[in-house]
Image (tube, grey):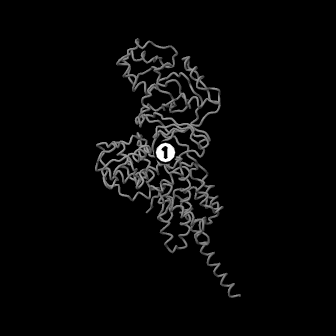
Amino acid sequence: MKHIQICILLFSGFLFTNISVANDQLRQTIENWSSGYPAVALNEAILNKDIINNFYINRQFEFAWFTANTLSAQGRVLISSIAGIGSEGLLPLDYHSAKIQTLLNTDLPTQDVAAFDILLSDAFLSLASHLQAGKVDPLALSTEWEANRRHSNLSALLQRVTDSGDVARVLDSLRPKQSRYYRLKIALTKVSALSNLAWQHPLAETPLLKLSTSDNRIPVITQRLKVWGDLHSGHVLESDGPADDEFPLMYTPALAEAVKMFQRRHGLEADGIIGRETIKAINISPEERAKQIIVNMERWRWLAADLGDKHLLVNIAAFELKIIDNNETVFVKPVVVGRNYRKTPVFSNKIRYLVLNPTWTVPYKLAVQDKLADIQKDPGYLNRLGIRVFRGDSAVAIDPYTIHWDEITTRNFPFRLVQGPGPQNALGQVKFMFPNPHDVYLHDTPSRELFKKAERAFSSGCIRVSDPLELAEFLLRDQGWDKERIAASIAKGVTETVSLKTSLPIHIEYWTAWVDRQGVLNFRNDIYERDQPLWQALNKPLIRIEH
């Protein structure tokens, strides 16, 4: 018995010595950083030096992820979470994954345990930050993107996870809670499983294909629609005529129905005609679509945790407006958004009031870049469109024929152009206001023919709404305004402002991929060419190896 006690005491002394050495190494590393030496651990750059410094000092250099030089259970959970973070569209390499795997397969010297512990703390901090607020700062890519990124006290979060030991729950709590994010995550897993399928050479975009025509592209189109699930194997109706294996080059009714489904999922006119735009979409491989899903998952991480139980959502890339009430879509309308060179910005705000029979003050940039040339060609242009001219902030209108327009340039344009209410007014009969520095709002338009087009990027940045009076009625119905009252007010031809008793959150977003409530995966063209820069930023490793 006495012999056993001596062995235990000797073994305890051995452990204590090793732990002391490791803890001392941890203290020395922190002090080296404070002395101006590079923040590195085992040749890996540490990205969260200041938080880590304070964290270990406050815990008196006690390890966070090791117990008696042995990796703890929560350390193993963290490493497992890092290994699987690709399912969130993030890079394991950003969280020291390569070095961690090397260390796991190595007989670790005692002095390296401290560095390993630091690496895991740094990995957790970066991972927590990225899950919660995204890896990429949207403003670094575009000044037209105003994000509402979620943030928390990372120091407190690190302390919380090491105290509670529930790494998985803490990390899960940081992910976006919206079901639309989780549906994208599921879609990423499915599409990534298809990424090894060779898409071979792109199909020729011409000539277009109509029902019952024959073309050597049909077998490839058929196979790709089967891969995407738009065409199920054996999906041939009796009325289709001969089966595909007898006439493999024939464009059959069954294939046409699958093409229509594919077109709907991609925001194309669902006419079953395989034209240039449909072929372009068919040519995009699962590997490229997986990238598209990943960049849209990152965009969800830029959003606030709470969009509002009831809110209005505009998806710029889908040319669509929705009102969501308690997770149910209760209102949907097509919209027209800004051209590529006058992009509609991404931001959130609240609709506070409507204006019936609005006037339109032509934005200064639009006045000097677009309107000035039209006026110089024909000063009568202003009178025909009911546009009055004011100098500066004067309330007195100027006769446009008294102005020497040929002497006015984009650098000396002292005028303000205001279009009165009426059938030619660019804002139509109503505008929906959520005051913002972008001077963007929702409004009616006299150019209704544009809503018939599949892609509708035609405005100067504001958002034109199809059936705007229906939207007005929807927003005002709890305030005693019905269709008849709105029509009567408009008929007077007098500008009237109607404030909402309860302002409505509005989120103007840019999603080129999403999964709807029916589980259908949708894609849209990247009209503002924002996906590729974001993909490149997401795939730029954060970790720098110091030599």
Of the pair 244 and 288, the residue shown nearer to us: 244
Question: Which quadrant is the C terminus positioned in?
Answer: bottom left
For the point 39% across and 17% down, the residue is 381
The answer to whether 531 appears left or right of 111 in the picture is left
For the point 58% across and 21% down, the residue is 496
Q: As displayed, is residue 44 above or below residue 269?
A: below
Residue 242 place in picture, x, y as percent: 33, 51
Total marks shown come to 1
User: Which quarter of the figure has residue 373?
Assistant: top left
The answer to whether 497 appears left or right of 262 in the picture is right
SS label for mark 1 = helix
Residue 174 visible in the current orientation = yes
Residue 386 place in picture, x, y as percent: 45, 17
Amino acid at the residue labelled 1: Pro
Residue 536 place in picture, x, y as percent: 42, 50
Question: Which quadrant is the N terminus positioned in?
Answer: bottom right
Of the pair 546 and 324, the residue shown nearer to us: 324
Q: As displayed, is residue 126 above or below residue 336?
A: below
Residue 203 place in picture, x, y as percent: 31, 49
Q: On the image, numbered disc 1 is attached to which residue? A: 138
For the point 50% across and 41% down, the residue is 509
User: Which quarter of the figure has residue 192?
Assistant: bottom left
How crowded is the residue under tag 1: few (<14 C-alpha within 10 Å), some, or many (20+)? Answer: some
Q: Residue furthest right?
A: 1
Residue 536 visible in the current orientation = no
